[in-house]
Amino acid sequence: MRNFLIVFFIASHTLFTVTSQNIQTPSDFLGYDIGTQFSRNHEVIDYFKSVAAAVPNQVKLEQYGTTYERRPLYVAYVSSEENIKNLETIRRNNLKNTGLLDGTPSATDIAIVWLSYNVHGNEASCTEAAMLTLYKLLTERKDLLKNTVVIIDPSVNPDGRDRYVNWYNKTASQPYDIDQQAREHNEPWPGGRANHYLFDLNRDWAWATQIESASRLKVYNRWMPHIHVDFHEQGPNEPYYFAPAAEPFHEVINDWQRDFQTQIGKNHAKYFDAEGWLFFTRERFDLFYPSYGDTYPTYMGAIGMTYEQGGHGIAGLGILNDEGHVLTLVERLTHHTVTSLSTVEMASKNAKQINTEFAKFFDNSNLKYKSYVIKGNADHLNSLKTLLNKHDITYENANGSRVSGYDYNTGQQGSMTVDSNTLVVHTSQPKGKMVKVLFEPNAKLTDSLTYDITAWSVPYAYGLEAIASTTKVSSDKFSEQNTTQALQNAYGYVSKWNSIEDAKFLGDLLQQDFKIRFTEKPFSSNGSKFERGALIITKGDNKHIEDFVGKLNSLAQKHDRSLMQINSGFSQNVPDIGSPDVKLINKQKVAVLSGEGTSSLSYGAIWHFFEQQLHYPLTSLNTDDFGGINLSKYNILIIPSGYYGSVLNENNMNKLKDWVRSGGKVIAIDDALRSFAGKDGFSLKFKPSENENDSDNLTPYAQREREYTNNLITGAIFKTKVDHTHPMAFGYDNYYFTLKLGSSAYSLLDRGYNIAYLDNTKVYSGFAGKDALSNLNKTLVFGEERMGSGSFIYFVDNTLFRSFWENGKLFLVNSIFLVNNNAYEL
């Protein structure tokens, strides 16, 4: 270690003999030895710009996006002069090699390596290593660039990084304090890990709900690199992790991908062994869930890998770990730099074989299912198409009348009628393996000890009917249909209610001061039948709006909503428009808890949902201030998943109950339900485990972790029964596929409404342990409990989890606007 660090610091001060005179070292540019301070994002980008200006024939910098906080997102293309000159030809040759671009490649001897740093903002050694890696590639290891193009993303998550760096820079002692209990080693809520909306960007590759992910995918899919590395940090007591990965591996991963990541790992080991550095492989980090920075590239044909350096946000510039070692930022970034260069080295040594094997990945002839056929709600289909477009996955329209295969709704073989609006996604396209991963009804799991959820099948997530066919289904090229028409003058207008797009329309109408009603019962008018939840906008309710029809028509066009006109308040069958069952929707004032005790991920998903999807105002309240908050200013209080023992103390709980009795509504999500279950005045209760007293506690130590999986549910899909006559379930059928993230079970409410519940424990997709399953039957999923004039609304399952379970979002909107609509309006 000592000898390596001496060389490291000599190089950082430009005394290394092979250093180009035109390129400043990171240390010279920044004005401090790299690793002795944390660099802010703009300083990192400025360094990359400086290098690109110094050697423009070897570095090309491209801004590919902007974060929510307006920080630029960049990638740098680093290679030889010849390769940079022919960069577009290299890119196109690579796409031709996959079949994504027509034609025969003129050459396939250049390896494309993508290095992604700092997806988690407080794993801050990564970006520091990006600067040193750039410098060393252009000076000490220029030989590697003759047959490689290295794409460097120095900071995938600059908003999170700067949140951490700015906090640390203003908090840390000088010199830094290595005591683990020092405040510089304890970030305040929410920490720097996540992006602006507190999303974990390393779980967002497949869903691309965040602007950083969506922007990056455009560039990634334009290049389709052969190797992708995602740089991370773990706890300060862990040394260094690199590939090969742990089981389970998804079955689409081929032997070459398995073998070559092992070869890369052995090359890293050579360098680590020479310095006496500790590392581990083949543990913890598997290749299964598709939305990681290692799995997504793997399912796109690359060698996708995660590298984890000990440190994380707790480590700061230096920390004394539990083994008595002072772990410094210098050491952490050095390790990442070594694996960065070692990866490029292996790519350079094997460039031709990498290209050959990469092409083979895109032969999808052996996939079991040849076509996935999907139909249902038009808005849900459009949302699915938006997702597929992000990944450049093609789809077509069915041209037959019936298809047979695996029926997602029943979980067994069946058939389904189709029409020209039915979507067909074939696996014969180049990205057929990613299609399989996203659509397969139940991914094959070789090991129940996994790092993340085990179910995500998009037909369930989007609430669509689907058939997986083992034969290729006949289809035509996709064509868009638009049916929106201008409104005519009438008594009123009715808009359907069964998607989040309808909810966006409602939110916009309310903010434009329209008065809108909804029906609690089906009715017919003008020969059309309208279901529960349908929105009714009458001329009589909106006399205060000048040019009512014109403004309504403009909003309907904006949201692509087709409104049906009604010519009288007298319906063909009851209820009439003036019925008590046709209720005015209040312009709700919504608040959400945030801060200590709150899950930052759960809060962030709610915050993002309101601002970026629903586009409806939301007030965030700090938990520390709860005792002094005037709740009467709000109609709705959303309590994200979290632990609120100190927040909802006796006084604050009584305050909350009084507000609800006066007409307020509490929406509690996931772990927030623990604050109410079994408490005085609440019907919500935990369901005791049938097996909790059966164990004699004789399981051997070595088997404990695996034995415990019997009690786990790691993201599994279940079919619930739904009371779709209740306003919380308006727009839904009498069943709903829920994504269950844990084994917490609540008994059915003996007061109030059990709106969605499990009446069997069949697992449609994913892993659920046998003991956890035995306790799930007859348990609550969504419920409402009245208290005085208001309500407590319970979400046992979090419908906003990572914002990808599209079909669950309307439950939340219903809870806000339609449930217990007699509650007061401010």
Image (cartoon, helix red, strand yellow):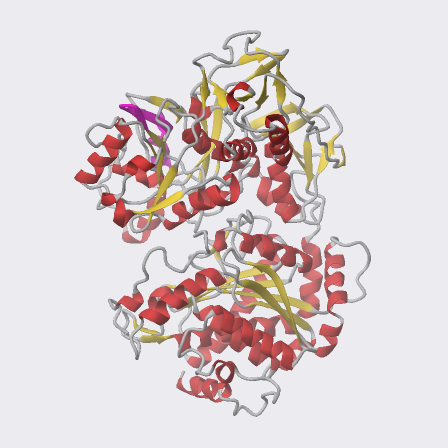
The spot of residue 716 in percent (x, y) is 45, 38
Relative to 470, is 624 on the left or the right? left
For this orientation, the residue located farthest to the left is: 650
Relative to 492, is 417 on the left or the right? right
Q: Let me know if residue 459 appears in the view.
A: yes
540 over 768 or under it: above or below? above
The magenta segment is: 769-791
The spot of residue 172 in percent (x, y) is 31, 72
Quick check: is 772 in the magenta stretch? yes
At a point 50% along the width and 87% down the height, the residue shown is: 11
The spot of residue 486 in percent (x, y) is 69, 27
629 over 423 or under it: above or below? below
Quick check: is 76 in the magenta stretch? no
The spot of residue 743 in percent (x, y) is 35, 38
Who is closer to the viewer here, 717 or 422?
A: 422
At a point 54% along the width and 7% down the height, the residue shown is: 573
> Where does the C terminus fall, quadrant-wise?
top left
Q: How many marks?
A: 0
Who is closer to the viewer here, 318 or 747?
A: 318
> Where does the N terminus fall, quadrant-wise?
bottom left
Q: Let me know if residue 718 appears in the view.
A: no
Image quadrant where residue 229 sits: bottom right
Image quadrant where residue 380 sits: top right
At a point 79% along the width and 62% down the height, the residue shown is: 105
302 over 790 or under it: above or below? below
